[in-house]
Image: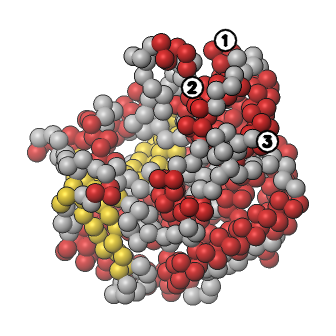
């Protein structure tokens, strides 16, 4: 996910001008009441209809062991008898004995704009086998994603045009170019989606989850949301607390209403600077393998040399500074990328551009999915909340932030800038909060140095969902830790999902091991070595 946060990290936000925000139209309470009634109607209808699971469409590229189906939800919950859209759903049946069965377990990987149709395949992984014995493993494509009433804003071929620039200190003329692109993008979303554009929201994603629960025949929800999935999962917990059985929040979006979404994005950019420093420190520690510099500063200079060369001559005609940055942004999310990215940088400086091209060049075959994911991301975040509509606010805040955190700041700003010119009405975010006893215990997982969803978000959600329990992976920064490399975290996750057990308040796990540096030469000479992510 590209838009999540740590409260209060960027002091310049205190001067945000309220008059620069677009606010939701009057009549919000009436609309919310109608949507609440509409959700109950849609859920009852889905419970009666169920889901006719069968062979998956070829486009899903899933094995025969997984079944697929669809569930109908209202485009507009205020009009449950109006236009319906279909969400695609996948399921892998529980593998254990009947006495072990605990129902359906739904997963969302975040985004906004990501699908979990692949998720039933996780049942074969060692970390998930125990859970898969007890639960039907269920994935789905949220509204707008994949084949679920897909949303598009521009031609996919235009979305992945390369090479692209990525100036750390954009000039006034470059800023004007990006403003024009953001306006055109917002207009494209409106032109393609029409009146339906306003209905791609986090609140509707939470309502869709309630309808999916009912369609699966479940009286109560078993759900795990990662990244953005924690935000609409928290909305679900606020709207339907009595319908929750087991709920896991993994890598948590700060749900405070004032954070959604402009401030969360600034806080994320600030946090990425520290994670970028973690990567450079690791590379420096392994200078004998990568020869990129024995200090983090020296590694940074190596990276800048590559950026400068790519600006003059893109690698393979496709990898310029923009593609380089996008590839290396991944190291802030997952340290599983560290070895491959360091290899690619090292090899490029030795005259071998192929690894960098392989890892950074956009793939035409991925253009449609990538454009669709970006369209849904933009629509949901722009619709969810007020955004500054005055470019001077964006310029002031991001210019100030870029002086402290240059690595992601402007790239993140350009990604979200269509929200300044968004044509659909904005909502006021729902206050995420439950009273003690309203929810059963829920599990919150967070890595202490996560940049995509900074740790303060997990602390904030823990305060707001009374009775929730926080598990922290100390001194680690991988984004999404449940079912990953940390056996301690996985133990808490399995205890909770299989037995409903949680620590009394909170617990900590030592960090998972750092990646083992593997040079391309060593990898070629040792084919038994596992491939990095």
Real-space Cα distance between discs 3 and 1? 29 Å
Q: Which mark is residue 312?
A: 3
Q: Nearer the viewer, residue 251 or 115?
A: 115
Real-space Cα distance between discs 2 and 1? 13 Å
Question: Which comes before the other along the chain, label 3 or label 1?
Answer: 1
Identity of the residue furthest to the right in this view = 172
Q: Which mark is residue 339?
A: 2
Q: Residues within 10 Å of mark 3 (few under 14, many from 20)?
A: few
Real-space Cα distance between discs 2 and 3? 26 Å
Q: Which mark is residue 288?
A: 1
Residue located at (72% from left, 67% from top): 181
Q: Position of residue 203 (x, y in %)?
A: 48, 69
- Which quadrant holds residue 158? bottom right
Using residue 76 as the reference point, say whether residue 387 is left or right of it: right
Q: Work out whether residue 435 can be spotted.
A: no
As displayed, is residue 520 above or below residue 412? above
Q: Nearer the viewer, mark 3 or mark 1?
A: 3
As displayed, is residue 449 above or below residue 93? above
Using residue 195 as the reference point, say whether residue 134 is left or right of it: left
Q: Nearer the viewer, residue 152 or 130?
A: 152
Q: Are marks 2 and 1 in contact (CB under 8 Å)?
A: no
SS type, badge 1: helix
SS type, badge 2: helix
Q: Are marks 3 and 1 in contact (CB under 8 Å)?
A: no
Q: Position of residue 65 (x, y in %)?
A: 19, 47
Residue located at (80% from left, 76% from top): 19
SS type, badge 3: helix
Question: Which comes before the other along the chain, label 2 or label 3?
Answer: 3
Residue located at (60% from left, 38% from top): 357
Q: Work out whether residue 26 can be spotted.
A: yes
Question: Which comes before the other along the chain, label 2 or label 1?
Answer: 1
Q: Position of residue 504 (x, y in %)?
A: 43, 38
């Amino acid at each position: 996910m590209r838009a999540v946060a740590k409260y209060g990290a960027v002091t310049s936000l205190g001067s945000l001008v309220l008059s620069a925000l677009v606010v939701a139209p009057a009549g919000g309470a009436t609309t919310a009441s109608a949507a609440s009634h509409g959700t109950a109607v849609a859920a009852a209808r889905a419970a009666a209809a169920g889901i006719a699971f069968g062979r998956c469409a070829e486009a899903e590229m899933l094995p025969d062991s997984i079944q697929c189906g669809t569930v109908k939800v209202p485009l507009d919950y205020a009009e449950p008898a109006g236009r319906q859209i279909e969400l695609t759903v996948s399921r892998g049946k529980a593998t254990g004995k009947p006495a072990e069965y605990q129902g359906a377990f739904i997963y969302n990987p975040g985004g906004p704009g990501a699908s979990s149709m692949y998720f039933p395949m996780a049942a074969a992984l060692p970390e998930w086998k125990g859970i898969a014995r007890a639960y039907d493993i269920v994935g789905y494509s949220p509204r707008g994603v994949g084949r679920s009433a897909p949303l598009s804003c521009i031609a996919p071929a235009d979305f992945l045009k390369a090479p692209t620039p990525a100036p750390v200190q954009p000039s006034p003329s470059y800023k004007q170019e990006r403003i024009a692109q953001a306006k055109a993008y917002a207009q494209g979303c409106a032109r393609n989606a029409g009146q339906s554009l306003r209905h791609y929201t986090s609140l509707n994603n939470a309502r869709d989850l309630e309808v999916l629960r009912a369609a699966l025949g479940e009286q109560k929800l078993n759900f795990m949301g990662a990244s953005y999935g924690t935000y609409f999962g928290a909305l679900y917990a606020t709207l339907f607390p009595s319908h929750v059985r087991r709920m896991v929040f993994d890598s948590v979006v700060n749900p405070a209403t004032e954070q959604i979404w402009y401030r969360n994005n600034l806080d994320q950019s600030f946090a990425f600077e520290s994670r970028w420093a973690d990567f450079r420190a690791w590379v420096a520690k392994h200078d004998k393998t990568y020869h990129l510099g024995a200090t983090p500063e020296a590694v940074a200079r190596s990276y800048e040399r590559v950026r400068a060369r790519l600006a003059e001559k893109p690698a393979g005609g496709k990898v310029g500074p923009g593609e380089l940055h996008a590839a290396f942004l991944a190291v802030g999310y997952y340290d599983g990328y560290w070895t491959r990215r360091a290899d690619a940088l090292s090899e490029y400086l030795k005259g071998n551009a192929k690894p960098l091209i392989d890892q950074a060049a956009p793939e035409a075959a991925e253009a449609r999915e990538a454009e669709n994911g970006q369209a849904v991301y933009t629509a949901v975040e722009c619709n969810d909340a007020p955004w500054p509509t005055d470019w001077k606010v964006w310029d002031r805040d991001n210019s100030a932030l870029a002086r402290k955190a240059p690595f992601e700041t402007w790239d993140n700003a350009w990604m979200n800038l269509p929200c300044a010119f968004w044509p659909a009405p904005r909502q006021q975010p729902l206050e995420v909060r439950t009273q003690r006893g309203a929810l059963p215990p829920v599990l919150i997982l967070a890595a202490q140095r996560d940049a995509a969803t900074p740790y303060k978000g997990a602390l904030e959600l823990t305060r707001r969902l009374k009775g929730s329990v926080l598990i922290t992976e100390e001194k680690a920064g991988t984004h999404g830790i449940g079912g990953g490399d940390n056996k301690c975290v996985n133990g808490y996750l399995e205890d909770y999902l299989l037995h409903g057990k949680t620590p009394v308040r909170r617990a900590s796990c030592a960090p998972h091991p750092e990646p083992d540096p593997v040079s391309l030469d060593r990898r070629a000479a040792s084919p038994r070595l596992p491939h990095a992510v």
